[in-house]
Amino acid sequence: MNAMTEQLHSGAGPSIGAILIDSGRLTIDAAERILRLQQEQGMRFGDAALQLGLLDEDDIQQVLSRQYDYTYLMPDDDSIGKEVVAAFKPFSPVVEQLRVLRSQLLLRWFDVDAGGRALAVLSPDAGEGRSFVAANLAVVFSQLGQRTLLVDADLRRPCQHRLFRISDKLGLSSILAGRAEMAECISRIPRLKDLSLLPAGAVPPNPQELLSRPQFGALIGTLCGHYDVVIVDTPPAARTADHQAVASRTRGAIVVARRHRSSAQRLQALVRSLQDGGTVVVGSVLNQG
């Protein structure tokens, strides 16, 4: 090993070059070319690599995320659906807004000194971005190092298992029907540290009755004891009363609306019904899409 290659492996932790070599993204010869330019021009390793055309910006951001334990995925990774933008484009404007929301929720609801808490994500109608917000909000909480669980409580048209590419053979409906234990139904998302998913499971004939059972409230309490953050997706509020059973157990909710689509009257009715039922409406999200 020559002097330049040794520089890739010196220091308290692996350098950008060492990580890229170990992952197969850079050859040793290419890394040495970058190091020469870095030394000659007094540049950072990443800037030298970009100038030589040996890496692109995605490569640099990805390796920095590994150095700083901030996990996200490369664009060609198909282990998770592209709708989960926080997993692929953590520096995009929409994800920056989700991080602002995360900060507000940490201040207003997820008090780190109060233990784990649950939050329902609701919207009046379908197509307003409720499941999108729930999925991506769960990702940004996990990227902060919070032990995060995403629960799909839409027992009518669930989608979170498709977004995260896991099986929905067992899930929330299985637990509430007494057909499976909690540990059997929760899946770790292997590519995203600190994120787990409890899918909806098989679509039952009696979703509202299942969600209204005392077992659901007990389950939420147990989950809050295991996780720092529990995010719960729900079905459209205007179509069923399922959301009321969910929100009464989580005790906190955010309401999602879509610009130029959501009905102000239905939004106001939803917020009133939540407040009348004792649920804290922590905030609202305007989906611009």
Image (cartoon, grey):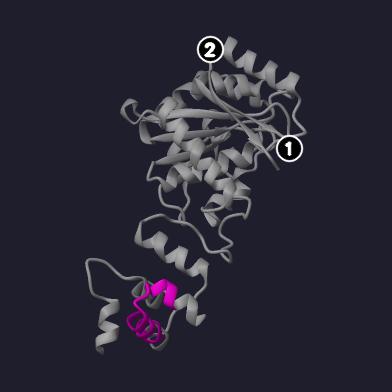
Residue placed farthest to the top in the image?
276
Q: Position of residue 78 (x, y in %)?
A: 59, 62
Most foreground residue, 224 or 19: 19
Is residue 260 visible in this depiction of the protein?
A: yes
How packed mark 1 is, by other alpha carbons closer than 10 Å (few <14, some 14-19, many 20 or more), is: some
| Residue under the point 58% across and 66% down | 76
Which residues make up the magenta segment?
32-48
Magenta segment includes 192 = no
- Tell me the chief SS of the magenta region: helix
Is residue 167 visible in this depiction of the protein?
A: no
Residue 240 picture quarter: top right
> From the viewer's perspective, is residue 197 above or below residue 278?
below
How packed mark 2 is, by other alpha carbons closer than 10 Å (few <14, some 14-19, many 20 or more), is: few
Q: Position of residue 201 (x, y in %)?
A: 59, 39
Amino acid carrying mark 1 in the image:
Gly
Residue bearing the label numbered 1: 127
User: Which image quadrant: the C terminus?
Assistant: top right
| Residue under the point 23% across and 74% down | 10
| Residue under the point 60% across and 43% down | 160
| 161 horizontally vs 43: left or right | right
Q: Position of residue 172 (x, y in %)?
A: 55, 34
Magenta segment includes 33 = yes
Amino acid carrying mark 2 in the image:
Gly
Residue bearing the label numbered 2: 278
| 17 horizontally vs 238: left or right | left
The tally of labels here is: 2
Most foreground residue, 108 or 155: 108
CA distance for labels 2 and 1: 26 Å
Most foreground residue, 35 or 132: 35
User: Which image quadrant: the N terminus?
Assistant: bottom left
Query: What SS does tag 2 mark?
Result: loop
